[in-house]
Amino acid sequence: MRLISDTVEVGGVKGPANKPIYPVSPVELWNPEVFTKGPPMDLFARLRTESPVAWNDEPGDRPGFWSVTGYKDVMQVNADFETFSSQKGGILMSHQRSEMQLARASLDGMINMDAPNHMQLRMEHMPYFTPAYLRGLTERVEGEVTRLLDAMAGQGRCDLVTALSSQLPLFTLCEILGVPVEDRPKFLTWMHYLEMANSFAAERSGATGGGLEGAAADLPPELKMFLDAFQAAVAEMFEYGRHMLHKRRLDPQPDLMSAIARAQVDGELLADEYLDGSWLLIVFAGNDTTRNTISGAMELLTQFPDQKAKLQARPELMPNAVNEIIRMVSPVIYMRRTATRDVVVGGQQIAEGEKVIMYYGSANRDPSVFANPDQFDIERANADKHIAFGYGPHTCIGKRVAQLQLEAVYRQILTRFPDIRQSGPKDVAANNFVYAIRSMPVEFTPAA
Ligand code: HEM
């Protein structure tokens, strides 16, 4: 199987080939600074009404893209995986052709693959995402939530991200992967740097058309120091991943790490580059998304105290409340596709080779599907119709893992700390791909 990082079309002709029928986007959606207060929902509402398929120029020699913000149009793009390729251009707007391990690994994973190889690799992961496997996991997750809340209990106030949101997804992922307990703290450091990498790469590609590569030369000393630390952390992450995966190839265990290590596509084991890519994908996708949803849920429960009280009075509403939380938080901001033929979306003619970006959070606030979409309503009848996990062949493989963690956290937290609330402003990283909540102060009194 050829490497995606060798074959991807990252640039291409600067678009658009066809005249935009709607106004161009009034804001730079490629710019991470636009996302520092969270996804700009007011702007998305405007785009859905005035320009549902808007042309966005990108700086430098980057190709530009069509932003798709309405539910129906996002569904069309997500479902039609033959017309809208994940592989041809990769799913991130910051992808670049590069020799850097991180840049290559961000391409050489199944999230950037098209049929038929994508499904072969996805099936190899599946045994660790089945309801039967997850039943066994639930008890361990419940135990970890109890342990984390025990540690918070005496404090009365804390940073929710440090104490809980960043810890639980890490624990859960390490359980599924089969990471030894003593190695787990490393993951927190890697996550810290990975989260910053996206902002950094997007910012650099905006400023220079370059991305991470070549960035060091023109940086001030403090940023250069950060870059050195960042590169060391990333190198350690890949080294650890390769070492463990090779170890599992020789000595398989009943864990996801062994499934990835022994996965075959077209009858062949994965090349080292695909091991790097699979490792990066699972470490990032399994952690960051759930972390930010746990924090985002706290903000919603604080802003809508009537819904919080209802959930405390009627805990049987929890599964629907979790869907509603994920709809409103939508921690993955976008996924990109490349058109494999000329196509029409929302009346707009799109040319073969052009990039199309789906904005999930915006689709999940589309009033034509979700009445009064900015209202957090834990009894919303169609909350499960949200597409925060995507749709189609790449639908999030970890969605049940995310749901079970959110249920466990909020079931326990609302019983043990009934008056818990966000007590100050959150800090959100400049990141246009993930709604990355870096810190959120909370206050609470443990129940008697
Ligand atoms: C609230 C939490 C989560 C959200 C909102 C989320 C969102 C998404 C989205 C939107 C995609 C689709 C990508 C596409 O269409 O190109 C995706 C794919 C994926 N997610 Fe998640 N995710 C979450 C949690 C998790 C967890 C907990 C794991 C692992 C334990 C995980 C692992 C993955 C993987 C491996 C893929 C790639 C699937 C493929 O390409 O077939 N995610 N996720």
Image (cartoon, rainbow, N blue to C red):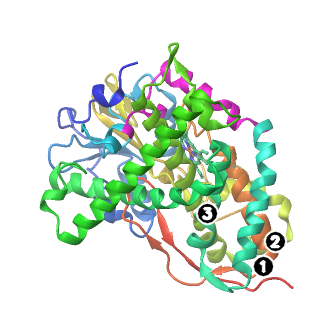
* Gap in angstroms between the C-alphas marked 1 and 2: 8 Å
For mark 2, what is the residue? 312
Report the magenta residues as a range: 105-131
Task: Give the side of residue 405 with respect to residue 412, left or right.
Answer: left
Amino acid at circle 2: Gln
> How many dots with numbers?
3
Image-quadrant location for residue 263: top right
- Please identify, in this view, whether the residue under mark 1 or under mark 2 is nearer the observer: 1
For mark 1, what is the residue? 418
Position of the N terminus, as image quadrant, is top left
Amino acid at circle 1: Pro
Q: Is residue 90 above or below residue 213?
A: above
Q: Are marks 2 and 3 in contact (CB under 8 Å)?
A: no
Q: Is residue 381 above or below residue 185?
A: above
Position of the C terminus, as image quadrant, is bottom right
Residue 122, given in percent of the width and then of the height, sits at: 57, 28
Secondary structure, mark 3, is: helix
Residue drawn at point x = 78 percent, y = 79 percent: 418
Q: Are marks 1 and 2 in contact (CB under 8 Å)?
A: yes
Secondary structure, mark 2, is: helix
The image's mark for residue 167 is: 3
Residue 132, given in percent of the width and then of the height, sits at: 80, 36
Q: Earlier in the sequence, mark 1 or mark 2?
A: 2
Amino acid at circle 3: Gln
Ligand 1 lies in quarter: top right
Q: Is residue 30 above or below residue 277?
A: below
The image's mark for residue 4 is: none
In the rendered image, residue 9 lying in the magenta stretch gets the answer no
User: Most prominent secondary structure in the magenta stretch?
Assistant: helix
